[in-house]
Image (cartoon, coloured by chain):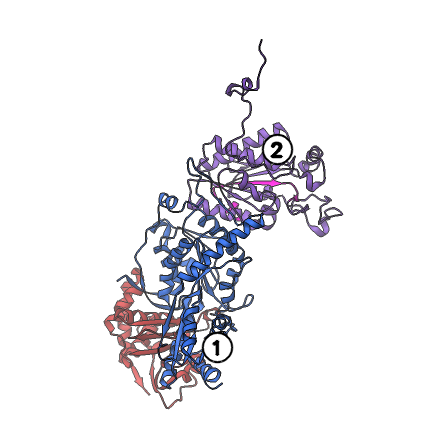
Chain colours: A blue, B purple, C red
Amino acid sequence: MGELKLMKGNEALAEAAIRAGVDGYFGYPITPQSEVIEYLMAEKPFERTGMVVLQAESEVASINMLYGGGGTGKKVMTSSSSPGISLMQEGLSYLAGAEIPCVVANVVRGGPGLGDIQPAQSDYFQSVKGGGHGDYRLLVLAPSSVQEMSDFVPLAFDLAFKYRTPALIVSDGLIGQMMEKVELFDQIPRLTDEEVIKRHPWATNGKPKGGERRILTSLDLDPHKLERHNWHLQEKYKTIEENEVRFEMLHCEDAEYIIVAYGSSARIAQKSIQLAREKGIKVGLLRPITLWPFPKKPIDELTKKGVKGFLSVEMSAGQMIEDVKLVVEGRTKVEHFGRYGGVIHSPEQVLEALEQKLIGG
Amino acid sequence: MSEITLQDIIKPENLVYKKTSLMTDKALSYCPGCGHGTTHRLIMEVIEELGQENETIGVAPVGCSVLAYEFMNVDMQEAAHGRAPALATAIKRLWPNKVVFTYQGDGDLAAIGTAETIHACNRGERIVMVFINNGIYGMTGGQMAPTTLPGMKTATSPYGRDIATMGNPLKMTELVATLPGTYYVTRQSVQTPAAVRKARKAIKKAFQNQLDGKPGVSFIEVVSNCNSGWKMEPVQSNTWMEENMFPFYQLGDLKVDGKLIDK
Amino acid sequence: MTEEIIIAGFGGQGVLSMGKILAYSGIMQDQEVSWLPSYGPEMRGGTANVAVIVSDERISSPTLTAFDTAIILNQQSMDKFEHSVKPGGVLLYDPNGIIHHPTRKDITIYEVQGAKLAAEMGNTKIFNMVVLGAYLKVKPIVKLENVIRGLKKSLPERYHKLIPLNEDAITMGMNNVNKL
């Protein structure tokens, strides 16, 4: 068993970055995730593992530092919250285009605009539908506990390097600020320069002796060549959709109704389900762990099984519900419930919505 | 006496100029007469001379030199517009023993990338930054640059740059020279053989500084022409540059070994 | 066993650290815990509160509207949280500075003179430990030895010399909690 600690989600993410053998963290403070860079600076990972930690001049610089550093084959990471993640969208598009692996964590807060600093889940569209320009996808993991804030860091890096693509960890102010028991995984050693060079022949870390130079770019002025590059990306995304869907199901065996919720909403919904079952309402939870690729198959199977309705519970005006509807295709009822703008719905409110929108309606 | 053939002439002892192997065979996409090609060559010659071919990572910008990586035969990354110093910062921090440089134009380095330029310079990143200043946006078709001279006509200042409404030209090189994080700051040009020799010396000094682990950025501005954007013949553009650009952007060293030069 | 608690008072009263020590104590005896603070500008000098859950099972929602126990340390928090206690639950408060005392009849109300006792002990900073002691007397959800282990785990080494004082404060609270 690993070391047990009581940690904030943000701290667990930072500690996991050190333990995952990350080579460089580049970030800019923003509430509610500033603990990440504060923790990293206080922990002196440059002494523990040799990890570089740099406070950049902006989120724009941070994400481009990921391009530079990730482009050399090193493990690089940043974190921010919604407005800062918006600033990174250009960079993410370039990273996806140039196929550079990296990990970005978004501790989502209320929006739009400056919004507030309270928890929200209103960056779902931005996370899974593009966010930046061009046809690309990000691999998106949604932790719903402090434990997963830790565990998903090495997982995100594994996936990012496996597919040479940026991976996003989407949590929110609730999970970032909350403390829970976390079992820390053991230190994964950082790769040596020689190992990086050997493992990632595509990376630009100095032209191999007698070999060809490497170029990392997202530019191709020939539309036919760029289309071919896009085909390659789409093939890759298809493979990810086939192999990397992750989700959790709770109490779905006998469920007549299904709540679909991720992250902190999934936690809240678990309490709602407990309250519902005390009243004799058979309801289960489908928790997407990967927001992209989205768990279409279990939703389709539950629909075929004849569930009476899905309630998409999200701290947004209704974003993930669109993906649920795309799977259900009108075969059964799909409704949304959520508070937003930084307001967190209570377990009782979720239950009330379930009763009114699905059962009574 | 027998007739001299081509075979007799092409001999190592007769060699007076050889293209560096660090320039690819791809034909340059720059307009004839443009300073970019010469500057590319000088950088690559210096890297070859210093034996850093396998140790160098370059960062290309957005602008006319967006395809610099097609011509420079070393490992290269293509940055988003203005962000080259951020890329170079991370590369150098993660690979401190490698040689890292950015190659940027005036729009990239002095407009959209101002923050990245100033902060990389102010943090004292141990990189080389090469800055081509031709006072205009060449690639997008001749629009006003931050470095466009007062009164100069461009596509977006068709009646000449009006300082009152369009602001002043930005002397980025003077600005970064004042920052404690720059170690060597110089302004050069490449329009004559003598200027090319001086520019080559400056570029070599900059890369040597990095190899010697000198603290801070070595920053080289190359004042260049843009005959297409300026709508001039190449020779005429160089004369115009000497007469109009040089008085405003004065050539020479601004900072050497971390110390400002008194002028 | 699942105990859902809200601790609320002024910023600076040690509300968040009391919750943290309680949560750490739960970990020391292999329980699941969550600690969710209100965060933001309001914490600076204004009200601060933290929801703590200690449970033998996996914790569902860390954010709650109804609690088994409310520990209330100022008037604003009384106004806000008296009605968040579940029927049959517990409200523990320090009457210092309270003008409108709790009136509910369907819950059990306790008081502890935390501020006064801490001042008598010569250290107002151990106020929160006195209150924690009072709580643990009413609801012994964690063992005292695990609280001490939790303290050791959550306090930096240089403060470990203060642990006996904290232990005394907890005992003081345990001995001076009154059911109303």
Gap in angstroms between the C-alphas marked 1 and 2? 71 Å
Segment tinted magenta in the rendering: B119-138
> Percent x, y for residue C97?
41, 80
Dot 1: element: loop
Q: Which chain does tag 2 point to?
A: B
> Percent x, y for residue C43?
45, 70
Q: Residue at x 51, y 48 (%)?
A: A217
- For disc 2, the marked residue is B190
Quarter that holds the N terminus of chain B: top right
> Percent x, y for residue A316?
50, 72
Residue type highlighted by circle 1: Arg
Asked if residue B122 lies in the magenta stretch, the reply is yes
Q: In the depicted view, which residue is nearer to us: B193 or C96?
A: B193
Pick out the residue farthest to the left: C145
In the rendered structure, find residue A331 and report the number of the disc placed on it: 1
Q: Quadrant of residue B42?
A: top right
Dot 2: element: loop
Side of A307 where C122 appears, left or right: left
